[in-house]
Amino acid sequence: MPTKSQMLFDNARRLMPGGVNSPVRAFRSVGADPIFMASGKGASMTDVDAKSYIDYVLSWGPLILGHAHPEVVEALTRATETGTSFGACTPREVEMAERIVEAYPSIERVRLVNSGTEATLSALRVARAATGRDKILKFEGCYHGHGDSLLVKAGSGVATLGLPDSPGVPQALAQLTITVPFNDLTALEETFRVHRNELAAVIVEPVVGNMGCVVPRLGFLQKLRTLTQEQGTVLIFDEVMTGFRVAYGGAQQLYKIDPDMTTLGKVIGGGLPVGAYGGKARLMDLVAPAGPVYQAGTLSGNPLAVAAGLKTLEILRRPGIYERLNSLTEKLTNGLAAEAARQGVGLTVNRVGSMFTAFLTPDAVTDYASAKKADTSAYGLFFRFLLEMGIYFPPSQYEAAFMSTAHSEGDVAATIQSASLAFAGLRP
Ligand code: KE4
């Protein structure tokens, strides 16, 4: 008898590409068919077949307070009672701008949009307009949304011109994107030498989430700041994932870097569609209607997304929230590492704050090349075993996992116990 998820997926494939609205949801890299979710509450989600899971994906980061937090639901319900969208200015979006500017001293002006992709492609347009330059630099394995300039893979050799990483991306555009390995200071300096004073922007995930969680080497971000400053290149911190996640002030607060521009998303929407880009006034005042760089959006600053986001940020400002979140995450990641070691399974766990990745490899993971050494079929087994046990990890080795304030010590203990059983199945 097929499950309800299986029946839904059969129908979904008839109607949507791959049966999903975003590729990673198809579970293709973990050798399973997707599960269709019916509801979420706190740290757990329940699927259409009434099976519940402790959720460590949390909608890919936004649900730092867990599913359906009562205060967020109440704020959202109240907002819907006075309308859902006006296409006009509202007080609430000014309040969101104030919260962002307060939390990110590097941001003097901010524009709300509807996704992280919109935020990053808009920030790049501003940087190109401000510098009059076309070339940009990104890092291998970093993902900044699906804007054409960012769907580019490294050309052969360091600091060479990019190649399209997706059909439909014009070669002429891809060539303007240089890609170098993350954490590779030599390649970085070489790139700035080869393309001296030609780079409009560098865009970076200051703590990478999209090759799995990878931590910046000591001095890497500082060097990036120095090189960009020296050559008038706009430094864009893509904090769509890390913003209000690794700290209330994001990775730039943790690593004490003052980027020229920052992109945000996920947490600031509290689970509703939102993105934001902002930075120095000299840059952001180029954006229409203050300046000539065009960017617009029907639902930008949407009252519902902003209501959910504002309540989320208010709760995140309460004392002790991040300390508990981070220490519970550390307890989980220490437990995973200890269990894997006890059973002789090669595991490397990278963590910053409450985002982490369990890589199925015994070696350090510091960039995309080392992340790709992870045993993805073993990860698939690990994922499927945990899913069976009611634990929902990211359906890809190359994604970050997240903790929420709704997770309990009991959830963490149950997760470590299930992982221990999974490791038994992976023992060499
Ligand atoms: P969206 O357009 O998906 O809202 O944001 C794009 C984006 C930009 N920058 C960073 C650092 C991001 O992590 C993302 C999106 N993250 C992925 C998770 N790896 C979204 C999940 C998905 O694509 O389904």
Image: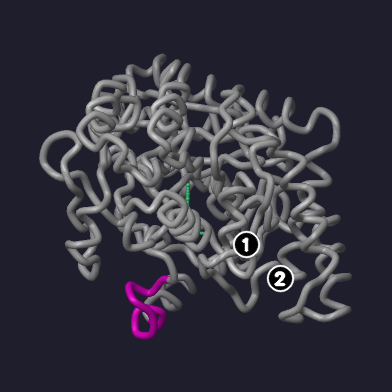
Residue drawn at 20 percent across, 49 percent down: 162
Work out whether 343 lies above or below 306: above
Work out whether 216 lies above or below 379: above
Q: Mark 1 is on which residue type? A: Val
Q: Which residues are magenta?
A: 11-20
What mark, if any, has residue 376 been given in the picture? none
Work out whether 95 lies above or below 160: below
Query: Residue 324: x percent and y percent?
Result: 74, 28
What mark, if any, has residue 274 been given in the picture? 1
Residue drawn at 45 percent across, 47 percent down: 394
Relative placement, left or right, of 307 versus 296 is: right
Secondary structure of the residue carrying tag 1 is loop
Provide the residue designation for mark 2. 302
Residue drawn at 37 percent across, 43 percent down: 142
Relative placement, left or right, of 172 versus 15 is: left
State which quadrant residue 410 falls in: top right
Please identify the quadrant where the C terminus is shown: top left
Distance from Cα at disc 2 to Cα at disc 1: 8 Å
Query: Residue 110: x percent and y percent?
Result: 66, 54
Instruction: For residue 406, say whether it is visible.
Output: yes
Q: Nearer the viewer, residue 199 or 85?
A: 199
- Classify mark 2: residues with Cα within 10 Å, few (<14), some (14-19) or many (20+): many
State which quadrant residue 382 falls in: top left
